Amino acid sequence: MQKPKEYINERERLKDLESYSILDTLPESDYDDLTAIAAELCGTKISLITLVDDTRQWFKSHHGMEVSETPKEYAFCAHAINEPDNVFIVQDARKDLRFHDNPLVTNDPSVIFYVGIPLLSDNNHPLGTLCVIDNKPKILSESQIQALKSLGKQVMNILNLRKTKLTLEKTLSNLEEKNKELDRFAFVAAHDLKSPLAGISGLSNLFIEEYGSQINDEGKEMLVLIEESTNVLRNLIDGLLKYSRCENVFKEDKSPIDPNDLLKSIRALFINVPELKLRLQNSIDVIYTNRAALDQVLLNLVTNAIKYNDKETIEIEIGVASSDTHYEFYVQDNGPGIAVENQEKIFEIFEVVAKKDRFGKTGNGIGLATVKKVVEKGSGSIKIESKLSKGTTFMFTLEK
């Protein structure tokens, strides 16, 4: 008996094999179906999908044979992988000097006939074989050999799909961990930044109160600018926190919501805006969804409709309806409208279209990006209809 030679790039081959994480896994029908087809196609008792590691050949599928592995030194497949570009054929192992006294030939399973198709990875390394075995000499036709090659390619397709799936799962797991780390960082950073900002704001006000009479108008103006800058930065931090946390907003439980109560709570938040006329168009009695998510979307849209309205009387209408699968909402205003070329931009984070709101403040471009993210997390969608000087309507859905 001749022991198989070590593959010329054995270290790289074994590393490639390990990357599939396939060794010692449970049987799977996808592989078993292929070995059953191979045995039927070639008229053999046995068909195997073998993977050769450093000490053994292990069978991912073993049709017609009970054992799941054999030592590498006895493996016909360990010879076959040294000729990766060829079909390895042994017509009668009893007459072959390499195998005539091999225990797999002289004892069970009495390997006489063997044909192995090397399974080549994307790196062109032979991982093992798809092989057919019988206990008597045989000759396969050219069409049988070609069909066996095609089945070998299907084995590699399944193995590569498995590898891709594992890679994607690992990438997803890493991304989830990084997101958790970013959430923790955002919380700590926001806390650490907001505390000194509050201190700066408080000191500015105290300075004006205590020393206002000793400061000229230019100095007072500079202190006011400090106060405004700290407020802008504080709002930016709050916006970024809301944007980062909206990933998890739908993890909270759903609850029944009365649309009329929802309107009352929103109206209460804007009681200090006397020029606001807020109304509801409702066709359903109850909404069953996550209250925090819905509040976040509606409050952002209503707040924007107020801030960027250019009319003396601000008119906002909230609509609530439903389809078989989703709740349907709209927020309509009588504001200045949004130009067509800006209607996609407004949902991009940090994208600011209007230079100033009705109060002379500049936005940070986070609110509508957060709205879009929350809606999509709720398996919904959001779109806009707007004409300049005619107002704007935001329409969004949330899955029931």
Image: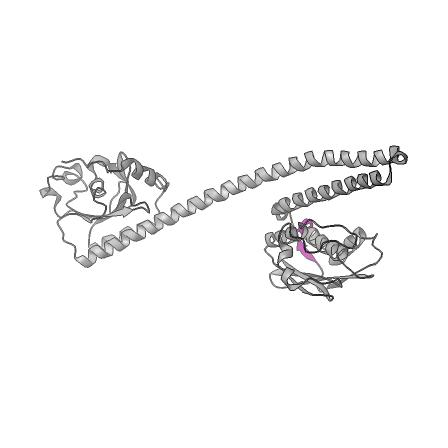
Q: Nearer the viewer, residue 126 or 110?
A: 126
Chain part drawn in magenta:
286-293
Vertical position of residue 168 compared to residue 197: above or below? below
Vertical position of residue 81 compared to residue 369: above or below? above
Figure quadrant of residue 221: top right
Q: Nearer the viewer, residue 362 or 347?
A: 362
Residue 290 within the magenta-colored segment of the rendering: yes
Figure quadrant of residue 4: top left
Q: Nearer the viewer, residue 340 or 89?
A: 340
The mark tally for this picture is 0
Relative horizontal placement of residue 204, taking residue 47 as reference (left or right)? right
User: Residue at (67%, 55%) from the top-left corner?
Assistant: 288
Measured as percent of width and height from the top left, residue 379 is found at 59, 55
User: Residue at (39%, 45%) from the top-left corner?
Assistant: 163
Measured as percent of width and height from the top left, residue 181 is found at 57, 37
Measured as percent of width and height from the top left, residue 233 is found at 71, 42
**Could one spot residue 400 in this view of the protein?**
no
Relative horizontal placement of residue 219, taking residue 3 as reference (left or right)? right
